[in-house]
């Protein structure tokens, strides 16, 4: 990021998320370019970073949105994503969410079970509408990623098996209130190997061919999200190799390819800034205690995820700046509250700034108010402009929805 991170931290305070919008644009273009000449739509997975400004930035570039709650659908619509570029996925949808999705007339409702199909049919019937649907197929492929973010195996709760999908398509085709136009799969997140994606594409494309043979015409072939990014020294998937594998698998099919990248677009656009409160050394360990914590960025605690941590403006390798390993920990009352373990860091003082890298995806969106800590502010950088895109929460924001206790309110 070409900016003075220290100045930004001074101006907006810490803990703070900072996103590089130019980088997001580059990432979007790198993927869009790899689809050149083919019918395609990039449905940004809003869950990765759902700040309205981030979604609006991608919408202006032409992106659609992949949403997993009606709240995300509303975010996408209010950020300016065209309704015909919005997909609503997720293993469980409430009737009112289904109703709202039908009323908004979004591109697709993605079904994850037979029971869900029946609910969507009922809600569509009550509204006198036809629901455009896709079905999430679980191709039973091991994506070779962290088990918590693996989704394409039969042991995972997502999607339906091929045979079930076929039965559902046949049912939907006959229904007056369902219009089966799409097919979907998503085998996992932070995928660094192409083979499992290529294999899943092949399996699902074969299903599309067999559906065509029984006059069920699939128009949208959705390959999900999951393209991995570099946190450390991972080898990841190149956009052109990714799209080539998809083109290869879908050869001869007249479909629009949809994909749902989240992390790919935003992970490395973001940095989480936190200030040192103090150091503490015991016989075994050096701890750097900072003002950011697991409630702000939970990935290290939850997945043991690695995020590179750097001491800003302290990198000179002088004898007095010699780096030694330290655990970077927050103020939350849990031993699992850490941002990094054994991080090589120079001696640090009160108010020194640390940058936690690759924090643009599943950072702020997974933040909580645990320990009544306010959620951090968010800032965007574009060209030479810096803009606050979400204010820091206050104590009042946190208690706003809480009510007087029963005893007092009972007359
Ligand atoms: N589409 C579907 C249906 C998904 O379930 C997901 C992610 C995506 C797209 C976007 O995946 P991406 O391109 O970002 O890998 N909190 C975890 C990641 C959970 C991903 C859940 N689904 C983390 O911090 O690593």
Image (cartoon, rainbow, N blue to C red):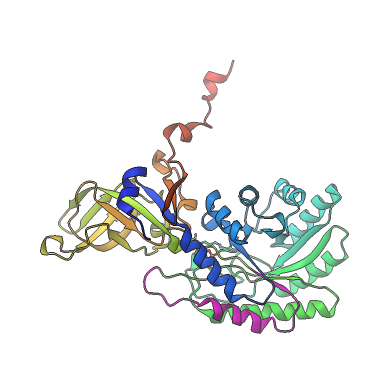
Image quarter where ligand 1 lies = bottom right
Horizontal side of residue 3 vs 27, given as left or right: left
Quarter occupied by the N terminus: bottom left
Look at the image and say whether residue 396 sits in the magenta stretch.
Answer: no
Image position of 195 with respect to 225: above or below? below
Picture residue at 64% right of the left edge, 75% below the top: 139
Residue 217 visible (yes or no): yes
Quarter occupied by the C terminus: top right
The residue stretch that appears in magenta: 231-258
Horizontal side of residue 312 vs 154, given as left or right: left
The x, y position of residue 7, in whole percent, is: 31, 49
Horizontal side of residue 207 vs 129, given as left or right: left
The x, y position of residue 182, in whole percent, is: 74, 68
Q: Nearer the viewer, residue 155 or 206?
A: 206
Residue 335 visible (yes or no): no
Residue 303 occupies quadrant? bottom left
- As drawn, the residue found furthest toward the top would be 411
Image position of 292 with respect to 204: above or below? above
Picture residue at 86% right of the left edge, 75% below the top: 215
Look at the image and say whether residue 234 sits in the magenta stretch.
Answer: yes
Image position of 8 with respect to 161: above or below? above
Q: Nearer the viewer, residue 305 or 11?
A: 11
Q: Nearer the viewer, residue 142 or 329?
A: 329
Picture residue at 54% right of the left edge, 66% below the top: 28
- As drawn, the residue found furthest toward the front would be 384
Residue 92 occupies quadrant? bottom right
């Amino acid at each position: 990021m070409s900016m003075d991170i220290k100045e930004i931290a001074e101006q907006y305070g810490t803990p703070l998320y900072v996103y590089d919008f130019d980088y997001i644009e580059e990432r979007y273009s790198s993927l869009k370019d790899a689809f050149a000449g083919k019918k395609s739509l990039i449905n940004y997975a809003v869950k990765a970073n759902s700040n309205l400004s981030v979604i609006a930035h991608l919408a202006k570039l032409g992106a659609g949105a992949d949403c997993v709650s009606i709240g995300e659908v509303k975010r996408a619509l209010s950020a300016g994503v065209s309704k015909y570029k919005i997909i609503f996925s997720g293993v469980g949808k409430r009737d009112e969410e289904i109703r709202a999705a039908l009323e908004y007339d979004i591109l697709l409702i993605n079904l994850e079970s037979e029971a869900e199909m029946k609910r969507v049919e009922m809600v569509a019937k009550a509204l006198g509408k036809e629901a455009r649907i896709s079905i999430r197929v679980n191709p039973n492929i091991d994506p070779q990623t962290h088990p918590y973010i693996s989704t394409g195996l039969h042991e995972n709760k997502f999607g339906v098996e091929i045979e079930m999908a076929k039965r559902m398509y046949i049912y939907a085709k006959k229904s007056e209130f369902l219009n089966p136009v799409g097919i979907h799969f998503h085998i996992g997140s932070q995928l660094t190997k192409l083979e499992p994606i290529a294999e899943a594409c092949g399996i699902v494309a074969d299903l599309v061919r067999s559906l065509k043979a029984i006059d069920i015409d699939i128009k949208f072939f959705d390959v999900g999200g999951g393209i991995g990014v570099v946190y450390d020294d991972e080898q990841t998937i190149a956009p052109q190799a990714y799209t080539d594998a998809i083109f290869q698998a879908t050869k001869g099919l007249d479909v629009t390819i949809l994909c749902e990248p989240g992390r790919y677009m935003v992970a490395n656009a973001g940095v989480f800034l936190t200030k040192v409160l103090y150091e503490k050394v015991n016989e075994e360990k050096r701890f750097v205690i900072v003002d950011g914590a697991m409630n702000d960025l939970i990935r290290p605690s939850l997945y043991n995820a690695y995020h590179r941590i750097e001491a800003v403006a302290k990198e000179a390798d002088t004898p007095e700046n010699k780096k030694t390993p330290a655990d970077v920990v927050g103020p939350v009352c849990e031993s699992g509250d850490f941002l990094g373990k054994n991080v090589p860091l120079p001696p640090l003082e009160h108010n020194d700034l640390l940058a936690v890298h690759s924090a643009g995806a599943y950072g702020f969106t997974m933040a909580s108010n645990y320990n009544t800590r306010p959620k951090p502010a968010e800032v965007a950088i574009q060209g030479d402009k810096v803009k606050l895109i979400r204010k820091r929460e206050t104590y009042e924001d946190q208690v706003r929805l809480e009510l007087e206790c029963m005893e007092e309110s009972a007359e």
